[in-house]
């Protein structure tokens, strides 16, 4: 049985311009959760816009990429690619 596609995403706060990195199976629903205030970390910086995302065949692939984005190497990669 094939796993559902997963996503690693970057949100940008319209409030203060900060970025948030995450991963999910349902991108549209996850953005709704962030913008509704149900996510503790992001509720104070609403509204959020989807800034960038990547699609993966597995949850583990998406989670590894999210973890990479949260490292200095990942930050430098996102800067070099002009994502952030």
Image: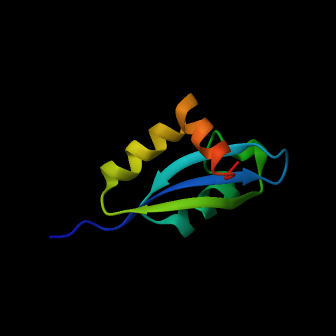
Could you say where residue 68 lies in the image, as x and y percent from the top left? 47, 38
Query: Residue pushed farthest front?
Result: 80
The colour scheme used to paint the residues is: rainbow
Instruction: Say if residue 17 shows up in the picture.
Output: yes
Query: Residue pushed farthest left?
Result: 1
Instruction: Say if residue 71 shows up in the picture.
Output: no
Could you say where residue 33 lies in the image, as x and y percent from the top left? 60, 58
On screen, residue 56 above or below 13: below
Drawn side of residue 84 relative to residue 73, left or right: right
Query: Residue pushed farthest right?
Result: 15
Between 76 and 63, the residue placed more toward the observer is 76
Drawn side of residue 43 relative to residue 38, left or right: right
Between 48 and 10, the residue placed more toward the observer is 10
Residue at 20% of width from left, 69% of height from top? 2
Residue at 46% of width from left, 66% of height from top? 26
Drawn side of residue 83 relative to residue 4, left or right: right
Drawn side of residue 42 relative to residue 2, left or right: right
Could you say where residue 1 lies in the image, as x and y percent from the top left? 14, 70
Where is residue 4, by image quadrant?
bottom left
């Amino acid at each position: 049985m094939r796993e559902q596609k997963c996503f690693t995403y970057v949100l940008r706060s319209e409030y203060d311009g900060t970025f948030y990195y995450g991963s999910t199976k349902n991108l549209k629903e996850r953005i709704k959760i962030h913008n509704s205030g149900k996510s503790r970390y992001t509720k104070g910086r609403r509204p959020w816009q989807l800034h960038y995302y990547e699609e993966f065949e597995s949850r583990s692939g998406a989670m590894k990429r999210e973890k990479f984005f949260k490292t200095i190497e990942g930050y430098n990669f996102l800067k070099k690619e002009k994502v952030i």
